[in-house]
Amino acid sequence: MQNYLPTSSKSFSLQRLRLLLLVGGGLMVSFIIADLTIIPEGVHQVYFISRLGMQLPILAVFFALTFLPFYARIHHQVLCLTILGFCYANYWLIVQCWQIAAFPFPDDGTLLYGLFGMFILRLSFKYSLLFVFLALLGFGALVLIYPVYGQFGLVDFGFLSFGLGISLIGVKQIETAFSQVEQVNEQLLHLSQTDPLTGLFNRGSFEQNFDRMLAIGTRTHTTISVFMVDLDNFKDFNDGFGHMRGDEVIRLQAAILREVFNRETDMVARYGGEEFVVISLGNSPAECEALAERILQSWRLKKVKHGKGKGQRYVSCSIGLVNVLVTKDTKKKQLFEEADKAMYGAKDSGRAMFVNASKPING
């Protein structure tokens, strides 16, 4: 079951909705006590039919529906029908009070139900618009057919239209404001999880997601691969060509990794400086080596000139990789250490190559 409803604020949970419905039920009971002091005794029976025979069952059905596993998908439809049901039960009561005792029962219930549904229970603007149209349609028919409010009927209709219209404007503004806040929050979350230079995961978010991927690997009994990728003699390149060119090379390395590792089960991150790390699920040892070779080949084809300091003729990278079948005993730290050790093995053996932690050095 989804814990949060598709309202303008993700903080609106099912638990909060149920609590508000219980509060609404309590308010209804308190209104009954107050109303009985002002309405004629002759209409008490129809009053109880409206409140206890119509509105309370509608509220009970609404409350019960919130326990459905798929309720979040139908929240706005159910809420719209509920407050419309309340309004039309109230219209029926108004008509009965007039016909039985010529008593003009107050018509402010429609506005109260609308305000509670739109602002407290967070009815969306689209369904608020539908509710207002149908509520005004019913009330307009009532004042045209029955002279309950006499010459003030059209005035009451205008007042209700104005009140609900203002409410619609408020709902739209709140919905827009919450949407903008949500977009900003998503942007902030994205910025907190990504490296600003490359757009890849940063080290912190990567390590958090690594635990999730290990859990997936354990459940699915699949392999997990860790690739440590480090640009060769990057400091010499950075010092010789400047930081702007250095940043270009780092971004180029990120683009290569994104191109090679483009599945949903791949995760690429900038681990720090010129060092990158990749986690990939479901690869065989041979497939891992083929992926590493693709990275090396991409640099060979690009032929980005280096030649500074101890650097080789063209920019290249060294790769260490480890590939294991995930079990409950698989440890993140051990995988990192093995891949990192293999990467330094590639550097010690001449750079521009990969080393598989479980096999002899390959070039």
Image: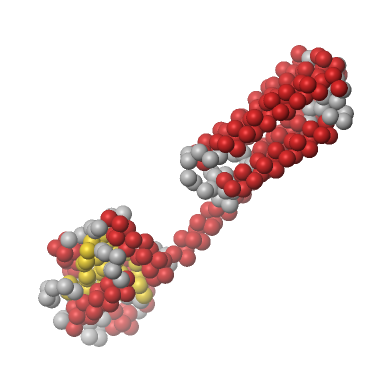
Q: Is residue 335 above or below residue 26?
A: below
Could you tell me residue 272's position as x and y percent?
36, 75
Q: Is residue 38 visible?
A: yes
**The C terminus sits in image quarter:** bottom left
* Res 332 → quadrant: bottom left
Q: Is residue 126 visible?
A: no
Name the colour scheme: secondary structure
Could you tell me residue 111's position as x and y percent?
74, 33
Which residue is pictured at 26% across the width and 81% down the height?
233
Q: Is residue 133 above or below residue 177?
A: above
* Res 131 → quadrant: top right
Number of on-image labels: 0
Left or right: 354 with respect to 56?
A: left
Which residue is pictured at 19% across the width and 78% down the height?
346
Could you tell me residue 248's position as x and y percent?
33, 70
* Res 362 → quadrant: bottom left
Which residue is pictured at 84% across the width and 34% down the height?
34
Is 129 or 284 nearer to us in this picture?
284
Q: Is residue 333 above or below residue 19?
A: below
Could you tell me residue 315's position as x and y percent?
23, 74
Which residue is pictured at 31% across the width and 82% down the height?
235
Q: In the displayed orientation, state which residue is furthest to the bottom.
A: 309
Left or right: 187 with respect to 102?
A: left
Left or right: 117 with respect to 212?
A: right
